[in-house]
Structure formats: structure tokens, C-alpha cells
């Protein structure tokens, strides 16, 4: 739409065809969410006494001005993306960008390698076997919660020393193949179980023929954090497994191309956002800097130099 849209009358047949074409642009899995967002906008427009043709840049700015009172900047962008086929205005884009500058995104927390190892060693299998398996596959394969939920037995093959795991249906339509180090204490495959989901409920030391839902899988990291006594375990969401996988790979020396291929990311920027700046990686970098040729011989350990330096510039400032 543009400012000249009101200069002529659009036939109802053309409007209907345009609406059908617009619906084809919507992703199949999120179609209901998009339609719900459009209904909310239409309801707001009708309450203000605005007709169907009164969709101008000023009207849309007023709508998002009211939306901003109840939603964070990230949600504003989500709503905008759902309406972007109709919202192609420079002012509105600029308005949303200004709000985003003040907003800091909250990312799912991740677990360090030693924390994962501690959980696998100390958590009792009777209570946490299902969590351990989801943790191993989720972190090793950078899996999303829905990918683990709908994983089929036929997608997992036992290669002796490792598991060959195929993730055929992904969000980015990129099939991924992962090799997961075999841990026979936690995982055993049944050849006749093809066509059934990999994750079944584990109750009182026995598997029962009931599928594990996505809500249970998404609580994997939270349960690990609770067992380890970490603060704010609710912030360890299911998506943290994917971020943790990318971070561990990057900290181990994997370049961005390897990280993208491992997680199935098409964008370098998106892949970088999944990598957490962990303390262990910072310490490793510091160690590499400290052992540069001749530096250690001249200065000695950095901490000793700063502590014993006679210069006042290294002293902490008084409050």
C-alpha cells in the first residue's frame, strides 16, 4: 500500500486474490501466529474507527506506539516481521530500530564442559537417565528441542564406537549428520523400533511406550542446572543446548565455517550470536598472550607484575 491507494477503488475480487497471495508467503508452521497478529491489528484499527483503506504510515506508527507500551523491543520486531508484507515504510523501520538500541536481548545460559561431565558422573541414572541422553545428543549435535522430540529410531545408527545421528527435518531445511561418541551405559538401540520416536518415557528404571513431549525435552538444561545447584536454573532453557554446542566447538578451536556447518546455520552473524564468551575461553586466550616469546621472561606472570608494580596507574581507584 502507499499514499495513492485511496485515489482509486480496488475491486473486491482483486483484494481477495491479493489476500490469497499474501497467505502463501506465510510459513506453514507459523501461519496461525501470523493470522492472529493480523487479527489484533484489525481489531485495534476498528476500535479507532479506521476503515480497511486507512492503513497509512501514520496509522501504523500509532499502532506500534501503543504496542510498545506492553511489549519489549524484540517482540516489536517480531510483530513487524509478521506484517512486513504490508509495512514497507522507512519511518516505521527507523522507529523500531531506535527502540532496539535500548534493549538488550536475553540469551539462554549455557553449561561449561566440566559441569556437564559432573552431572553425567553424579546424577543417578534411575532418575536422570532420560535427561542424560537428551543432554548428550542435544549438545553433541547442536539440536533444537523439536529435533530431539521427533527423532526417530531409524535416524540413529550404532557404529560401534559412536552413534551416527541424522537430523532430516530442520528449521533451516538443511539436513545435518552428527557423530556422537557412544556411551553404552546410557544409550541402547533396538533394531525393530524403527518408525517410532527415539525418546520414550523412563519410569522406575523401565522404558514405557509413551513418547516424550517437547516440554519435557526443553527442560533438560534446567534440570541439569537444578541438580548442580546453579543460580536461576529457569534461565537454562532448551535452546541453551544448541548455544552450548556452538560455544564448546568454538572454544576447542573450530572456525566459524565449522560452527556453521555443525549447527546448520546459513548466516555467519547468526552463528556468531550462538557462541558464548565463556571465562574458560578468555583464560585460554590470556595464557596464549602470556607465553609469547620473551614476554614471560621479561615481565613474569601478569598478576605478579600488576600486584608488585610501583607505578600508581595499576592501583585500583578509590571510590
Image (cartoon, rainbow, N blue to C red):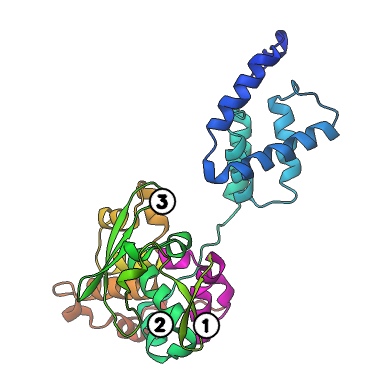
Residue beneath disc 1 = 230
Query: Which quarter of the rendered picture does the C terminus lie within?
Result: bottom right
Residue found at x 57% / y 48%:
101
Q: Position of residue 127 (x, y in %)?
A: 49, 87
**How many residues crowd around disc 2 within 10 Å: few (fewer than 14), some, or many (20 or more)?**
some
Look at the picture and state if 264 lies above or below 315.
Answer: above
Marks 1 and 3, how far apart at CA: 27 Å
* Residues marked 2 and 3 touching at CB (< 8 Å): no
For mark 2, give the secondary structure: helix
The front one of 132 and 2 is 132
The front one of 44 and 300 is 44
Q: Determine if the magenta segment contains residue 114.
A: no
Q: Which of the marked residues, 1 or 3, is nearer the chain's N terminus? A: 1
Q: Determine if the magenta segment contains residue 218.
A: yes
For mark 3, give the secondary structure: helix
- Residue range in magenta is 214-242
**How many residues crowd around disc 1 within 10 Å: few (fewer than 14), some, or many (20 or more)?**
some
Residue 115 - label: 2
Marks 2 and 3, how far apart at CA: 26 Å
**How many residues crowd around disc 3 within 10 Å: few (fewer than 14), some, or many (20 or more)?**
few
Q: Position of residue 198 (x, y in %)?
A: 40, 68
Marks 1 and 2, how far apart at CA: 10 Å
- Res. 98 visible in picture: no
Q: Which of the marked residues, 1 or 2, is nearer the chain's N terminus? A: 2
The front one of 281 and 5 is 5
* Residues marked 1 and 2 touching at CB (< 8 Å): yes
Residue found at x 58% / y 31%:
23
Residue found at x 13% / y 72%:
293
Amino acid at each position: 500500500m502507499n499514499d495513492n491507494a485511496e485515489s482509486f477503488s480496488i475491486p473486491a475480487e482483486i483484494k481477495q486474490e491479493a489476500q490469497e497471495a499474501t497467505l502463501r508467503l506465510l510459513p506453514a508452521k507459523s501461519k496461525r501466529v501470523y493470522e492472529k497478529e493480523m487479527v489484533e491489528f484489525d481489531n485495534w484499527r476498528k476500535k479507532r474507527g479506521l476503515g480497511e483503506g486507512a492503513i497509512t504510515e501514520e496509522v501504523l506508527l500509532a499502532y506500534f506506539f501503543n504496542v510498545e507500551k506492553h511489549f519489549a523491543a524484540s517482540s516489536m520486531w517480531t510483530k513487524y516481521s509478521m506484517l512486513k508484507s504490508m509495512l514497507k515504510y522507512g519511518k516505521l523501520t527507523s522507529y523500531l530500530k531506535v527502540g532496539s538500541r535500548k534493549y538488550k536481548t536475553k540469551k539462554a545460559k549455557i553449561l561449561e564442559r566440566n559441569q556437564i561431565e559432573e552431572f553425567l558422573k553424579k546424577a543417578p541414572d534411575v532418575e536422570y537417565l532420560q535427561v542424560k541422553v537428551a543432554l548428550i545428543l542435544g549438545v553433541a549435535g547442536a539440536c533444537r528441542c523439536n529435533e530431539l522430540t521427533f527423532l526417530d529410531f531409524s535416524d540413529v545408527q550404532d557404529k560401534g564406537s559412536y552413534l551416527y545421528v541424522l537430523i532430516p527435518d530442520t528449521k533451516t531445511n538443511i539436513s545435518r549428520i552428527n557423530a556422537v561418541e557412544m556411551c553404552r551405559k546410557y544409550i541402547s538401540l533396538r533394531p525393530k523400533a524403527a518408525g517410532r520416536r527415539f525418546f520414550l518415557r523412563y519410569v522406575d528404571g523401565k522404558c514405557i511406550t509413551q513418547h516424550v513431549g517437547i516440554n519435557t525435552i526443553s527442560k533438560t538444561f534446567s534440570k541439569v542446572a537444578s541438580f548442580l545447584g546453579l543460580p536461576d536454573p529457569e534461565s537454562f532453557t532448551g535452546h541453551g543446548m544448541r548455544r552450548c554446542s556452538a560455544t564448546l566447538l568454538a572454544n576447542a578451536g573450530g572456525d566459524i565455517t565449522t560452527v556453521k556447518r555443525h549447527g546448520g546455520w546459513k548466516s555467519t552473524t547468526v552463528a556468531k550470536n550462538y557462541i558464548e564468551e565463556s571465562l574458560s575461553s578468555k583464560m585460554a586466550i590470556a595464557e596464549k598472550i602470556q607465553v609469547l616469546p620473551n614476554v614471560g621472561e621479561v615481565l613474569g606472570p601478569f598478576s605478579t607484575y600488576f600486584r608488585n608494580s610501583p607505578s600508581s596507574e595499576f592501583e585500583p581507584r578509590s571510590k
